[in-house]
Image: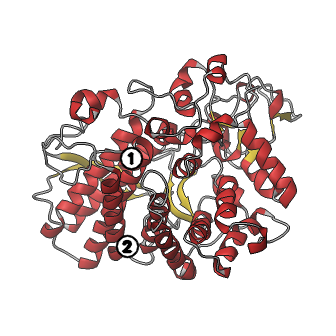
Amino acid sequence: MNKLYSRLSAVMLLFSALAVTSCSDLLEESADEVLLNPETLNTVDALEAVVSGTYTKLLNSARWSDFLIMGYGGDDITTHSAINKIGFREADWRRQTTLSQRIARTYTGCYDVVTGSNIAINARENIEGDQETIDRLIGEAHFLRGFAYMYLTMTYGRVPIQLESNSNAEIPRAEFIDVYTQIESDFLQAESLLPDVYPNLTVIGSRPSTATAKAFLARLYLYWGGFPLNDQSKYALAAAKAKEVIDNEALYGYGLVENVGALFTEAGRFNQNEGVFTLVSCVTCGLANRTMGRLGMPPEARGWSETFGEIAFFEDMQADAALNGTEKRFNDTFVLEVIPRNENPVGAEWKSFSDPHPILRKVTGGDLTEPGTNNTVGEFNRYFMRYAEVLLTYAEATGRSGGNDAMAWTALNRVRNRAGATAELTSGDGSLADLAFLERKWELAGESLRMTDLVRTQTLGDALLRRNQGSQMETADEVNNIIPATGGENLYFSPIPQAQLDIAPWLND
C-alpha cells in the first residue's frame, strides 16, 4: 500500500463481513471479520464483503459534516465564528492552510474508499462464481472509486491517483485532465457492468445502477466543461448522458417527489424515488447521520450553530420565490420559526436569535417534531445526487452546448413546477443555460453543491463579495479582508492536510 495512506495496512485490509439490516439498504458490520488479500480473494462472498465494507467506509466518513468541507465555501451556507467551528469557518472564507482543522476527513475517507475499490477491481480475474453477480460488484467498485476521486478533486484539486492495492510507489499529484479521465473511466466501467435496476432495494439509489453511473457521468462532463479544464466540448456529452437517464426514467424508477421537504425527514426517507445515489443512515447500526438535527439550530433552540444559511442568499431566494411563486420550495429550504430552549409554545423568528442567520431545513430535518431534529444523530438520508439535478444538468448542458430544444426546457420547468412556479419558462425568457444554472442555485441550496457550481463557472469570488457584511457572525477581520474576485486554485480548493504531506512530502508541489 502506498505510504500516502497511512491509516491503511501495508499489505492487507481489514473488512467486515456484512449483513443486510431490516431498517435500511446499508449493511451493518457483523461480529465476523475477514482478512482479504487481493491476491487470494477468489470467491463471490469475499468480493461482496470487500464491496460492502467499502460502502461502510464511505458512510463512516460521509455521515460527518466535514466530509463535505468544500461545501462551506459556497454562498448558500455558512457557520458560526466560535473556535470549535474554526475549521468550517476557514473553509467558508477560503482561508485554509495545510494545518486547518477539519480538512482531513474527505482525504482519508475517500482514499479508504479507493483502497477498498482497488482490492475488488484488482482481484477481478481471480474470482469464480456467478458472472452476473461478479460484474455487478465490480461495477459498484468502479463507481465507488470514481465517486471518491470526484469528491477528492472537487475538494483538493490535483490529487494522486492510486489504482493498485499493494504499492509503495511515490505517486505525485496528477494533473486535472488525468484525474477527470480516471473518473470518466471508472464511471464508464460502472455503466457497462451495473444492472439497469439494482435488485431488492428498499430505497432507490442506495446502491448504484447503470442510471446512477450515467447521471454521474453527466455531472462529470458538466464540471469538465468549466474550470479548471474548460473543455466546452464536454457539455454535449453531459446533455447526452443526462438525456439517456431522463428518456428511461420509468425503467430506472426515477421521478420527482411531490413534496421535496419530505426527502429530508426520517419518516419519508423510504417513500421516495428521487435519490440517484443515496446513503441511508441507521442509528441502531452505529451509522447515524451526524450532519443534521441540532447542528443546524442556534443555542436558543438547543442547537450547535454548525451549519446555517447565508443571509444574502436567503434574501435573494425569498425575493425570487415571491416573484415566481416558488414559496413552497423556499419554505422547504428554510425554517422560519423554531421553538426556543425554554419550550415557549410561541414560535421565534430566526432573526431574533443571537446567531442571526437563516436556519436550513435540509440541515435541521424537514419535520421539526421528529426525534432526529432534536438530536445530533438521526436517520436521515444523505443525498449525493437527486433526480432534480439530472434534469437541471440536462437543461444547463444543452444550453451551454448551443442547444435550445423543447425537452431541455421541459426538464427545467419540471423542477420549477414542483417548486410551485406560477409560469413556465420559454426561450423568450432568456438563456437556457443561465436560467438552469440559476434554478440549480435554488433547488440544490444547502446540499453542498453550490461551491462546485461557483468554482466551475469561476464566480466564487463575486459570490463572496455579495455576502451580507452586517451580520455579527462575520468578524471584523473577515469583513475587512474579504477575498477579491480573482479566482485561482488557492481560492477554489483546499490544501492537502499537513499530516499527509509529512508522510508524502513529494505532494508539496
Q: Indicate whether 250 appears above or below 470.
A: below
Q: Looking at this rendering, what residue extends furthest in the right direction?
A: 346
Q: Indicate whether 477 appears above or below 291.
A: above
Pointer 1: what residue? 152
Q: Amino acid at mark 2?
A: Glu
For image coordinates 35% across by 70% down, the residue present is 188
Q: Indicate whether 250 appears above or below 49.
A: below
Q: Indicate whether 45 appears above or below 76.
A: below
Pointer 2: what residue? 191
Looking at the figure, which quarter contains the C terminus?
top left
Relative placement, left or right, of 328 versus 276 is: right
For image coordinates 59% across by 32% down, the residue present is 484
For image coordinates 82% across by 54% down, the residue present is 321
Q: Looking at this rendering, what residue extends furthest in the left direction?
A: 39
Labels 2 & 1 near each other (Cβ < 8 A): no
Disc 2 residue crowd, few under 14, some 14–19, many 20+, Cα 10 Å: many
Tell me the CA gap for discs 2 and 1.
Answer: 21 Å
Residue 266 is at least partly visible in this image: yes
Q: x, y (%) of residue 78?
A: 63, 34
Relative placement, left or right, of 221 versus 142 is: right
Q: x, y (%) of residue 36?
A: 17, 53
Q: x, y (%) of residue 173?
A: 27, 43
Q: Nearer the viewer, residue 81 or 196?
A: 81
Q: In terms of secondary structure, where does tag 1 sit?
A: helix
Foreground disc of the pair 2, 1: 1
Residue 426 is at least partly visible in this image: no
Q: How is the image coloured?
A: secondary structure
Q: Amino acid at mark 1?
A: Leu
Q: Nearer the viewer, residue 47 or 9?
A: 9
Q: Nearer the viewer, residue 412 or 485?
A: 485
Q: In terms of secondary structure, where does tag 2 sit?
A: helix
